[in-house]
Image (cartoon, helix red, strand yellow):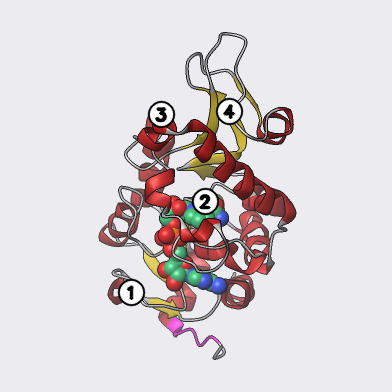
Amino acid sequence: MEPIELTPEIRERLRAAARMVVFSGAGVSRESGLNTFRGAGGLWERMRPEELATPEAFRADPAKVWQWYAWRYGTVAAASPNPAHVAIARLESLFPSYIVVTQNVDGLHQRAGSRNLLELHGTITRAVCERCGRGREMGEAIAESPERPPLCVCGGRFRPAVVWFGEALPEEVFAQAHEAAATCDVFLSVGTSGTVWPAAGLIELAHGAGALFIEVNPEPTPFSRLADLRLAGPAGEAVPALADEIERSR
Ligand code: NAD
């Protein structure tokens, strides 16, 4: 990756910023060995997530969907945060207001030390009863019943605590993300294709409200043309380099 060259204007805006939002997608976890949904390779990757990560799929074949999540949970449990997650956590202490809004369900931001975090699409590390809402740890639920969703004491089925395609985002969580995007000074988008809505709308919202918009993604996205600064490299290299520059600017 090319070294980062900040213009004096961008450096000044980073120096003066009080509120920063980091918006992350599956690409931030790619270098932890977790595939994005559009990645290639492996048995389950030949399945279409849109056909498994839905309430309809779970109703039609709960065992198949549960096994897919058991496999995904295994890959997440075996993965570790990469330098991008670590750099994102490191920046938290530099701003009076700093929030990570993630579309990921893998829990790697928390494991890297991020504290102020909104998980827009829930988490694969928990299971929840679809009838009574009781929660439990996903690893325990899978250990108890690897082949099919275990049953709750109420008789309902456990499912992963994630937001499936076609389901609404948790209202309060999205409202907080909306507020953060609308009022931030710096909006850093990392490893998201900007194709999953309504989460992707946060980028336009922040840009429209006048935030400095920085994008990290090796590939162009529908939002690249809006970026004040675009870092076309892998997150594990680009984000630590950017974090160094931000630290220097403050
Ligand atoms: P996405 O919007 O998350 O797209 C992934 C993006 O990451 C692409 O634009 C790609 O160019 C970029 N990318 C790939 N490697 C990168 C790297 N090393 N550094 C930076 N960027 C990189 O879309 P998706 O993957 O199709 O996911 C759809 C939904 O499912 C999203 O909500 C996503 O977060 C979620 N998902 C989560 C996980 C996870 O929790 N790890 C994994 C797969 C999908």
Q: Image point 44% across, 36% down: which residue?
A: 173
Q: Which residue is mark 1?
A: 224
* For discs 4 and 1, the disc positioned in front in the rendered view: 4
Of 33 and 60, the residue lying toward us: 60
Q: Amino acid at mark 3?
A: Arg
Q: CA distance from mark 2 to mark 3?
A: 23 Å
Q: Image point 57% across, 77% down: which residue?
A: 238
Establish whether ligand 1 lies closer than 8 Å to the Cβ of label 2: yes
| Stretch of the chain drawn in magenta | 4-8
The 10 Å Cα crowd at callout 1, few under 14, some 14 to 19, many 20 or more, is many
The 10 Å Cα crowd at callout 2, few under 14, some 14 to 19, many 20 or more, is many
Q: CA distance from mark 3 to mark 1?
A: 38 Å
Circles 4 and 2, Cβ within 8 Å, touching? The answer is no
x and y, in percent, of residue 180 in the image: 41, 47
Q: Image point 36% across, 50% down: which residue?
A: 199
* For discs 3 and 1, the disc positioned in front in the rendered view: 3
Q: Image point 72% across, 27% down: which residue?
A: 144
Of 116 and 106, the residue lying toward us: 106
Q: Which residue is mark 2?
A: 104
Of 192 and 94, the residue lying toward us: 192
Relative to residue 199, is residue 208 drawn left or right? left
Relative to residue 106, is residue 233 drawn left or right? left
Name the disc covering residue 59, or none: 3
x and y, in percent, of residue 189 in the image: 44, 64
Circles 4 and 1, Cβ within 8 Å, touching? The answer is no
Q: Amino acid at mark 1?
A: Ser
Sequence-earlier tag: 4 or 2 = 2
Q: CA distance from mark 2 to mark 1?
A: 21 Å
Q: CA distance from mark 4 to mark 3?
A: 11 Å
Q: Which residue is mark 4?
A: 149
Q: Can residue 13 be seen by looking at this rendering?
A: no
